[in-house]
Image (spheres, helix red, strand yellow):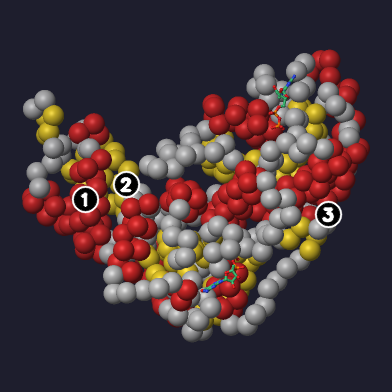
Amino acid sequence: MSDTTRKPIVAVVGRPNVGKSTLFNALAGEMISIVKDSPGITRDRIYADVTWLDRAFTLIDTGGIEPDSSDIILSQMREQAQIAIDTADVILFMVDVKQGLVDSDSKVADMLRRSHKPVVLVVNKVDSFDKFMADVYEFYNLGIGDPNPISAANRMGIGDLLDEVIRHFPDRSEAEDEDDRPRIAIVGKPNVGKSSIINKLIGENRVIVSDIAGTTRDAIDTEVVHNGKEYIFIDTAGLRRKNKIKEELERYMIVRTVGAVERADVVVLVIDAQEGVTEQDAKIAGIAHERGKGMIIAVNKWDAIEKDDKTIYRFQEKVRNTLAFMPYAEIIFISAKTGQRLPKLFETIDAVIENHALRIATGVLNEIMAEAVAMQQPPSDKGKRLRLYYITQAAVKPPTFVIFVNDKELMHFSYTRYIENKIREAFGFRGTPLKFIIRERK
Ligand code: GDP
Ligand code: GDP
């Protein structure tokens, strides 16, 4: 029985034009199964789900838009590197054999070495292994290990590179022994109140910031004890960029969100009540949805808006419409300022954690399915009727069900949704997505 919670994160760092996007596209084009776009969400090529051999991981491109002057390249690379250090399990550091060793590469390599994170050095644009290998050896001077020559454009050396990357992943059996305290990621746009909520939850105005090379740490884990239970809060707040280019801010927000969400069991998406729910909120919610996390939408600053007896209802409607792909999400209206309903937030987190890891006995599931089938006949096509033989729960986090049928083609999305609703009627599962895998058995 597998637990699908934690996929390793691999972050790509490197100067502009070394070929990061080209590598990204090579991986995204061929060897990966990109999770289907959720309705209403546009996908940026900022992160991708990659599978190599039997290991799945999330690839993040930390490189933003191109800076227009060389003196900000180094500072931008440091920020990229810091994000990679904070979020990634393995860092891919990419350099360009045609440009050779550049001073900013050495500085960033120093920073990566000091982080003690696994770093894989990639030398790109080695279009001919015969001609350019001598130039590749120069990169040993970076002091971060063996250079891995590739040509992203010609898709050479990529298999060996991925072998090297997954070699650094935590052992699966080891990973299972990891601490089992629930992890909650607090995500949302800037200024919605993420830090305020965390501070209030901690119960004191303590903000943990470690300043490295002029940047603020991206994801901060905070242990919180509530009613004798321990929780780990993963905070994506605290990043205040002087560099206010819109696309870049958005990219960093998404990179940090993917990193935090990947490590979490439950995601609290904070929305600003004064601003209402936006497309950007939907994009962030989509990241959690794709990854099958437990989901709570916390509408914050509820103290600051004028209310009548229908305000909550109307707001809820708008959230449900904008985030229509996650009807299972819990919605809660809070104020970090006054503390209104923050105890309820903990209760909701507890409930969602429980639902996300809930396991239903096979016998009960089959009773529910039999009843559902009796109440609404399965669809048929060209004289052949869908038959549902058996259902069993194969995994938790999120709860994943396998249904055995006579013909997969006949199992329409709407009938799966019908079965899902019957399971939800029986067990609730509020706050968690459910996954269904349809298998044929003749
Ligand atoms: P990024 O800024 O790091 O994302 O770099 P890009 O992926 O946009 O690549 C920058 C330039 O290098 C583009 O013109 C690419 O076509 C080129 N490039 C990328 N990979 C290779 C390669 O393996 N060999 C050669 N010769 N050029 C490459
Ligand atoms: P973050 O960027 O998401 O971490 O947002 P902050 O926690 O820094 O909050 C942004 C601003 O919103 C600050 O000025 C806070 O004082 C304010 N704020 C946060 N929570 C609330 C709230 O519940 N009510 C009101 N009225 N203001 C809030």
Q: Quadrant of ligand 1?
A: top right
Is any atom of residue 230 visible in this view?
A: no
Q: CA distance from mark 3 to mark 2?
A: 44 Å
Residue 244: % across, % down:
69, 50
Q: Is residue 91 left or right of residue 398?
A: right
Q: Dot 1 lies on which element?
A: helix
Which residue lies under the disc numbered 1? 419
Q: Nearer the viewer, residue 235 or 338?
A: 338
Q: What residue sits 73% from the left and 68% below the top?
A: 209
Q: Nearer the viewer, residue 390 or 344?
A: 344
Q: Are marks 1 and 2 in contact (CB under 8 Å)?
A: yes
Q: Determine whether the residue tagged by mark 3 lies in a helix, strand or loop.
A: helix
Residue 26 location, quadrant: top right
According to the picture, the residue beneath numbered tag 3 turns out to be 114
Image marks 3 and 1: residues in contact by CB distance under 8 Å: no
Alpha-carbon span between mark 1 and mark 2: 10 Å
Q: Which residue is mark 2?
A: 436
In the shown orientation, is residue 170 left or right of residue 13?
Answer: left
